[in-house]
Image (cartoon, grey):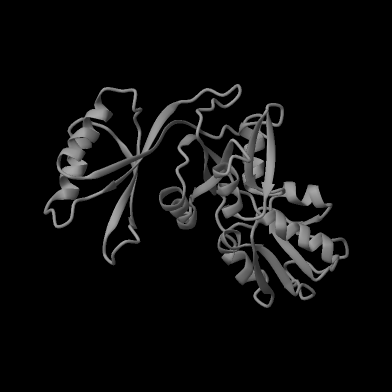
Amino acid sequence: MKRIALLGPGTFTEESADYYLGRNHFDYVNCKLIDDVFMSTVNGQTDYSVIPIENTFDGSVSLHLDWLVHEVELPMQAEWVYPISINLLGVAGFGASLEAGCSGLKKIVSHGVTLTQCRQFLRQYLPHVELEQVGSNGVAARMVKELGRSDVAALAPASAGALYGLHTWAQGVQDHYNNFTRFVLVGSEPLRLPEKTSAMVKTTIIVTLPDDYPGGLHQLLSAFAWRRINLSKIESRPTKKKLGTYYFYIDIEASMDSVLLPAALQEIEAIGCQVRILGSYPTYSYEPEGSKV
């Protein structure tokens, strides 16, 4: 049975893996920190890692992208998108209403990204509370359970509440309801998701332009444009080697098995660009019908 490392338990990462992968064919290894998730697969303790890399409203998760680019050599083998619904969870004994300002609530714990996705809710209903960031939403829910205090709550997925026996004080408190997170499965071997069909294959590359090359970015983009290859994402990130130098993180709606994409990459390399392929993989879209949430 393949072993998969992820942030968990009680996290959106775990929820998404349950939805797309299920529990029958895989053994999940829960980790507290994203560093542990990556290193578990690097060190051979697990076969794959599940990594959240982008959110609808926060954009790219820079720390996780930096790990994929600078720290590890783990090819992307699959990608999926999953909806994020954040709940306010606590132990029994909560009596005040949100409209009353939750005067009895003193602290909320959650992952930093989750807190930013609930800024409007926190500002409107809970401006007085202390906010504490922890390594994952699952850790936050466990802390609230262990503390057993009615004046401490967690912002976390419903699955975390069910796991730790917490009460749902408010549902869907994220600032935006069209809130999705993109996850990638990374590892050394290809993996087809069970009983899933893919509508598209994507390829992700890292491109570093040659120094002092006028028009280099234009030529880079032209190699895709005249071949009518669609780029679904292009983002510049610092190379961490010299101030003011960047690489381009590019998602391409094409497979390396096609004729056009390898030719485009060869053209880019011919002008002196460095190209690194992070993966060519199936991407799966969320289908609400029959889902678990």
Residue 218, horizontal then vertical, whole percent: 16, 47
Residue 54, horizontal then vertical, whole percent: 48, 49
Q: Quadrant of the N terminus?
A: top right
246 or 95: nearer the viewer: 246
Q: Does residue 23 appear in this view?
A: yes
Residue 288, horizontal then vertical, whole percent: 60, 34
Taking 47 as reference, is 217 above or below it? below
For this orientation, the residue located farthest to the front is 43
The residue located at (71%, 57%) in the rendering is 139
The residue located at (31%, 23%) in the rendering is 258
Q: Quadrant of the C terminus?
A: top right
Q: Quadrant of residue 115?
A: bottom right
The residue located at (28%, 64%) in the rendering is 242
220 or 82: nearer the viewer: 220
Q: Does residue 293 appear in this view?
A: no
The residue located at (34%, 27%) in the rendering is 256
Locate residue 173 relative to residue 250 in the image: left or right.
Answer: right
Locate residue 142 relative to residue 275 in the image: left or right.
Answer: right
Taking 102 as reference, is 224 above or below it? above
For this orientation, the residue located farthest to the left is 214
